[in-house]
Image (cartoon, coloured by chain):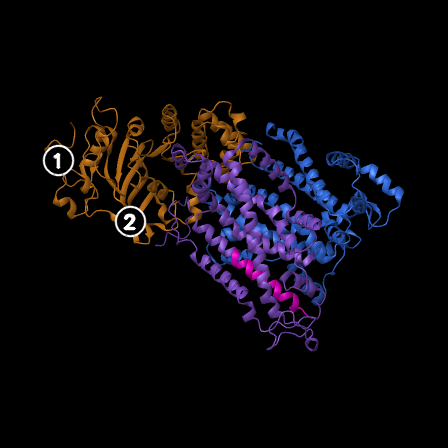
Amino acid sequence: MNMTTSIPVLRRRFRIRFGGHPRVLYVGLGITIFWFILALGADVIAPFDPNAHDISNVLDPPSFTHWFGTDNFGRDVLSRVIHGTRVDLQMGLIGVILPFLLGTVVGAFSGYFGRFIDIVLMRILDVMLSFPWLVLLIAIITVLRPGLGSFYVAITLVGWVSYARLVRAQTLVLKNSDFVHAAVSLGYGHLRILFRHILPNALIPSIVFSMSDVVLVILAGSSISYLGLGVQPPTAEWGVMIAEGQNFIVTAWWITAFPGLSIVLLAFGFSLLADGLGEKLGVRE
Amino acid sequence: MHRFKFVIYRPIQMIPVLIGISLITFILIHSIPGDPVRILLGPRATKDVIKAVRAQYGLDKPVYIQYGYFLKNLLHGDMGRSIVFKMPVLGLILERISATLFLVSNGLIYALILTLPLAIMAALYQGRIPDHLIRLVSTVGLGFPAFWLGIMMMMVFSVWLGKFPVSGYGRTFIEHLHHLFLPSLTIAIALSAILIRNLRASLLTELDSDYVAAVRAKGLPESWVFIRHVIRNSLIPTINLLGVNLGWLIGGTVIIETVFSVPGLGSLLVSSIFARDYMVVMAITMVFACAIVLVNFTVDVITVALDPRIQL
Amino acid sequence: MNAKVLEVRDLEVTIETPAGVLTAIDRASFDLRKGEILGLVGESGSGKTLTGRAIMRLLPSKKMAIRSGTIHVNGEDITRYDESRMRGVRGRIIGMIFQNPSSHLDPVMTVGKQIAESIKFHEGLSSKASLLRAAELLRQVDIPDPHIRLNSFSHEFSGGMRQRAMIAMALACRPKILIADEPTTALDVTVQAQILNLLLDLRQRRGLSIMLVTHDLGVVAQTCDTIAVMYAGRLVERATKKDLLSGPLHPYTKGLIASQPGKTQPRQQLPSISGQPPALASFPEGCRFHPRCEFSEAECQAAVPALEQADRDHYTACRRWHSLVQQKVLGAA
C-alpha cells in the first residue's frame, strides 16, 4: 500500500540537506586553478610565440600543429588564447581588488561614523547607481584615453559602489553588536575597533560578491577591449581577438570562437566558486 | 490609494539625483584634456564662432559658473553640437533613440518569454533533471559575453543559415522585427540567465511557505495554488531584480548595437568616442542615466501595485 | 452517545532519516464524536501536530508517510483515497486552522478572496456570489464591517482578527470536522479567550466537531469534552476532561497537570517533570516515558504498553496504573 507518492507537501519543516553542493565549490575551484596555471605558465605551455607572424599559414583551420587554427596574420590562436589568459585574469583580479579596497574603506567609515559622511555617501551612491555601469566606464575611459590603465581607473571609480554598500550595511549592523560595545568599554580607539573587530566580520558578503564580480569585470574588460577602448592590439586579449576575428567570421570562425569559449569557461569557473562559497558561508544573493 | 502618494513626491526627490547626474556629466566633460573650444567645435572653427561659443558656454568664467551655463543650456534643450554630424546633439539623439528603444523592449519581451517557462519548469521539477539542466545552462549563460554571443548568433543564423540580416534596422515595423531579432535575442539570453535563477529561487520559497500550506488544506489543487498564489508572490522580488538589471541592459545595448550595426544610441556612443565627438558621448551618457532613473521609478510603481504591504 | 465522525485506529507515521526509517507516530487510536471537542495534548515533538496533518494527508515532508492504520471519516477509510479524492475531503469535510495566522494568509490577496476561493472552487459559485458568502462568514466569526473587510489585506488585521479570518476560511465550505492546530498559541491571552469562545460558539451553532491540538492544558480545560494525551509519538491516556483532570491515570498526565501555573501556592516552586522528551532517533525501550517517570519499574522497560481500558471511557497506557491507583498516586485525589 503505497501512500507516499501523490500526497502534496504541507510544509517542509523537516527538509534534510545533502550537505549543500560541495561539488560546486570544488568544480569551480578546479576550473579556476586550471586557468591560473595556464596564465602563470603561459610562456612554457604555449606552443608558439603569440605575436609571431607566419604569412605562409594565414587563416588555417584547426589542425594538429595549430589546435585552434591561425588568424589573419598566421599567429597561432591557441598560443594567443593561452597568453590572453594572463591579461584577462589580471583584469579580473585587479579590477576587483581596487574597487574592493576603495569601497570597503569608504563603506566602513560611512557605516561606522555615520551622520554627515553617511548622508553624502548615500547621495553619491544613488547618483552613481543611476548610471548604466558600462556606459559610465566608457565615458570615463573616453576622458582618460583608451587603454588598460584607463580601464583600471574607470572600473575602480565605478565598481567601488557595490562594495561600499555591502560593507556599510554590515558595519551598521555590527556597530551595535555586543562585542563592539565590549571593545568600546575597554577603551579601544575607533580605528582599532573598526579595522580589527568589525571589518573582518563585515567583509564576508563582500568576499562572496567579489567572486561573481570577477565575472562581471572580465566580461566588462573584454567588452571594452572588443570595442577598442581597453587592451589594444596586438596584445593577445580575448576581447581584442574576438574583435579582430569578427571580420573573418565567414571564413575563419575559429578566431572568434575559441577566445569566446575561454571567457565563458573562465567565467563559469568563478561563478561556481561564487555559488559554492556563498552556500558554504550562508550568504544568499 | 494612499499607497500611491509617493508618485507625487518621488519626482521631487528625483531632482537632486538628476542634478547629480548633470554634475557628474559636467565633471566628465570638463576633464577631457585639451582646449574646451576645440572639444566643442572640432579643429576647424572660425574666430566668430569661437567667440560665440565662448560666450554661450561661459568658457572664460570660473568653473562653477560654467556649470550654471551648462544647466541653463541643458534646460533649453541645448546639449551641444555634434562635430561629425554637424547638427545639434539633441536632434541627433531624437533621431536614433527609436532604434534603441525598439531593441530594449524587444529584448525584454523575449527575455520574459524565455524566463517564465524555464523558471517555472525548474521550480516544479526541483531536484530532478530538468531543474539541474536549467540551472546549469543559466549558470553557464551568466558567463557569456554579450558581444561574443551576438557574433556567434550572427555567424550561425545570418551567415551559415542566412535566415536573418547581419545588421541594420530596416524601414518598416516588420523589417525592424526581422533585423532586430538576433540582437534582441542576444540581450534576452543574457538577461534570462540572471532572471531565471532568481525567479526559480523565488518560486521555491513561495511553494514552501505557510500560506501555501493553508491553501492546500482547503482542498485546492496544485495548479490553483500555483497560478493564483505562488506566481504573484514570486514575481515581486524578480521584478525588482529586473529593475536593478535594467541599467545593465541599457549598457548592454551599447555593445549589441555595435556588434549588429544597429543605428541606435549605443552605436552612436561608440563611434563618437573614436571620432572625438565628445558632446555626443556625454549627452548620451546623461540620457541613459535619466532613463534609468525613470525606469526605477516605474519599477517602484509596479511593485507597489503588486504588493499591498509596501508603503513607499 | 453521538455518532463518531472521525475514527483513527493504529495510525503509524514514519519518517526517513539518515539514521533509517523511524516511527514518528506509533499506533495512535482515538475517536471524535459529532459535536464534540477533542483536545490532543502534548509537548512539542510529541507528534500531536503531525497527527492533525496526517489526518489531512498533508504531511510536511516527502520523507514522511502513513505506513499503516486507518482513518475513518463518516465511515470511509481516507487513507485509501488518492490525491484527487482527498481534495474533496479537505475543506469540504475536514477543515484546518493553523498556529500562526499571519504567515498562513496570502499577503497579496484580499482576505475576502481567500475565503471565497474555496467556495468558488468546491461549489462552482461566481466570484460575486462567493464573496457574498465570504462576507457572511466574516460576520459569523464576529468581524465588524464584514463587507468592507472583504477588501482588506491580512497585514491590516490584528492577530485575533487574522485567526478569525482563518476560521472563516476553513469553514467556508461547511466542513463537519475542524482540526485546530494550536490556534491560540501565537495570540495574546485576552484574544485567546475570544477565539476559544468563538470555537465553542461555532460548535454549538453548526454542530461542528473539533479536534484541538495544543500543548496548553489551560486551553483544553476551558473548551474540550474529551482529552487525549500524547507523548513521544504515542497516545498515553484518553478520557473525558473531567475524569482526566480530576483523576489522571498516567504519570505523565499527572506531571503535566501539576506543572500548570495556578495550582501552585505562592512562593512554592513550580513542579516540573524532570528531564527532556526523547529525540526521535533515541526513543526508549518499552514505555517511552519510563526514564523520566518516578514510578517506573522493570516491567515498564520490558514491553510496549498498550492502551488499556481502566474505566468507562478512560484509557491509559501505563502498565502500573492499577497498583499506582491503589497507592493513591494516580487517580482521583
Rendering colour (chain A): purple
Instruction: Determine contact: label 1, label 2, CB under 8 Å.
Output: no
Residue ID for mark 1: C324
Seen in the image, is A50 located left or right of residue C161? right
> Which residues are the magenta region?
A252-270
Q: Main secondary structure of the magenta part?
A: helix
- Magenta region includes residue A263: yes
Seen in the image, is C317 located left or right of residue B173? left
Residue A125 coordinates in the image, percent (x, y): 60, 39
Rendering colour (chain B): blue
Name which residue type carries label 1: Leu
Seen in the image, is C243 located left or right of residue C149? left
The chain painted orange is C
On whether disc 1 and disc 2 are found on a single subunit, the reply is: yes
Residue at 62%, 68% in the rendered image = A80
The circle on residue C23 is: 2
Residue A195 coordinates in the image, percent (x, y): 46, 42
Residue at 58%, 60% in the rendered image = A264
- Magenta region includes residue B2: no
B130 to A8, vertically: above or below = below
Name the one closer to the observer, A25 or C295: A25
Name the one closer to the observer, C44 or B58: B58
Position of the N terminus of chain B by quadrant: top right
Name the one closer to the observer, C263 or C124: C263
Residue at 39%, 48% in the rendered image = A15
Q: Quadrant of residue C170?
A: top left
- Dot 1: element: helix
Subunit under mark 2: C
Q: Quadrant of residue A50?
A: bottom right
Q: Alpha carbon of mark 1 to alpha carbon of mark 2: how far?
A: 29 Å
Name which residue type carries label 2: Thr
Subunit under mark 1: C
